[in-house]
Each structure stands twice: as C-alpha cells, then as structure tokens.
C-alpha cells in the first residue's frame, strides 16, 4: 500500500513515442520542446518526460501518452495541445 508521502513524490509521466515511425515524424523535436516547456514553467518536480517504444498507433504518430490518455498526430505546429493539457493540470489549477 502506498503511503501519502509516496503519492506526493509520484510524478506525472508524459511518454513520447520514439518508435521508428514516430521518430521519423519528429518525436525528438517534440521532446525537446516539451522539455523546454517543463523547465520554463518549473514543472521538473511534477512532470517526468519519458521516451517509449512503439505505442501501436503508428499511422497517427507522433503519439504521446499523457495521464493515461493517448494524444495523437502531435507535431511542432500543434504541440500547444500538449502545453494546454499540462497548463490545465498544473498551472491553472493553482489559480482556482
Ligand atoms: S512508432 Fe509511434 S506508435 Fe508506432
């Protein structure tokens, strides 16, 4: 059973697919942008950025698994969708 302390230390995992198809579609650039976003917003203690193997949805890559939700067709032009998700989860919540 997890203690309250363990739960507090648990990070929110964002997994970017680095399978060959997503890699060719730019997952590395997306990872770099997400890393910058996390640093800029000081979310390092809350969000862990990970790479994953193929998530099985190659046609819809780049795929990102975030909060058990699969975001598909992510690219550098629409990465704002992911930023918005993280803002709503960690930044805007503090304003409520
Ligand atoms: S390579 Fe990313 S889902 Fe298959």
Image (cartoon, rainbow, N blue to C red):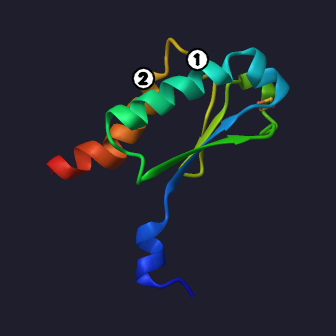
- Give me the disc on residue 94: none
| Label 2 CB sits under 8 Å from any ligand 1 atom | no
Residue at left 40%, top 70%?
8
Question: Is the residue marked 1 within 8 Å of ligand 1, measured from its CB?
Answer: no
Q: Position of residue 35 (x, y in %)?
A: 49, 32
Q: Residue drawn at (41%, 53%), measured in percent from left and top?
A: 46
Q: Residue 64 at x, y = what percent?
A: 62, 36
Q: Would residue 63 be found to the left or right of residue 3 on screen? A: right
* Label 2 packing within 10 angstroms: few (<14), some (14-19), many (20+): few
Which secondary structure lies at badge 2?
helix
Determine which residue is flagged by label 2: 80
Which residue occupies 42% across, 47% down?
A: 44
At 55% from the left and 25% from the top, the residue drawn is: 32
Q: Earlier in the sequence, mark 1 or mark 2?
A: 1
Q: Residue furthest top?
A: 77
Labels 1 and 2 touching (C-beta < 8 A): no
Asked which secondary structure carries label 1, the reply is: loop
> In terms of image quadrants, where is residue 37?
top left
Decide if residue 74 is on the left or right side of residue 26.
Answer: left
Q: Nearer the viewer, residue 94 or 72?
A: 94
Count up the numbered dots.
Answer: 2
* Residue that carries the numbered disc 1 in the rendered image: 75
Ligand 1 lies in quarter: top right
Q: Callout 1: 10 Å neighbours few (<14), some, many (20+)?
A: some
Residue sitting farthest toward the bottom: 1
Quarter of the image for residue 73 reads: top right
Q: Is residue 30 above or below residue 69?
A: above
Residue 12 locus on image (x, y percent): 49, 54
Image quadrant for the N terminus? Answer: bottom right
Residue sitting farthest toward the left: 95
Residue 56 location, x and y as percent?
A: 82, 37
From the viewer's side, name the closer residue of 59 and 52: 52
């Amino acid at each position: 059973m997890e203690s309250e302390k363990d739960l507090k230390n648990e990070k929110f995992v964002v997994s970017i697919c680095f399978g060959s198809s997503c890699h060719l579609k730019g997952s590395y650039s997306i990872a770099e942008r997400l890393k910058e976003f996390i640093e800029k917003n000081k979310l390092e203690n809350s969000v862990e950025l990970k790479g994953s193997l193929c998530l099985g949805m190659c046609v819809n890559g780049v795929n990102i698994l975030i909060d058990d939700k699969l975001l598909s067709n992510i690219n550098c032009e629409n990465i704002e969708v992911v930023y918005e998700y993280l803002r709503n989860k960690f930044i805007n919540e503090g304003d409520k």
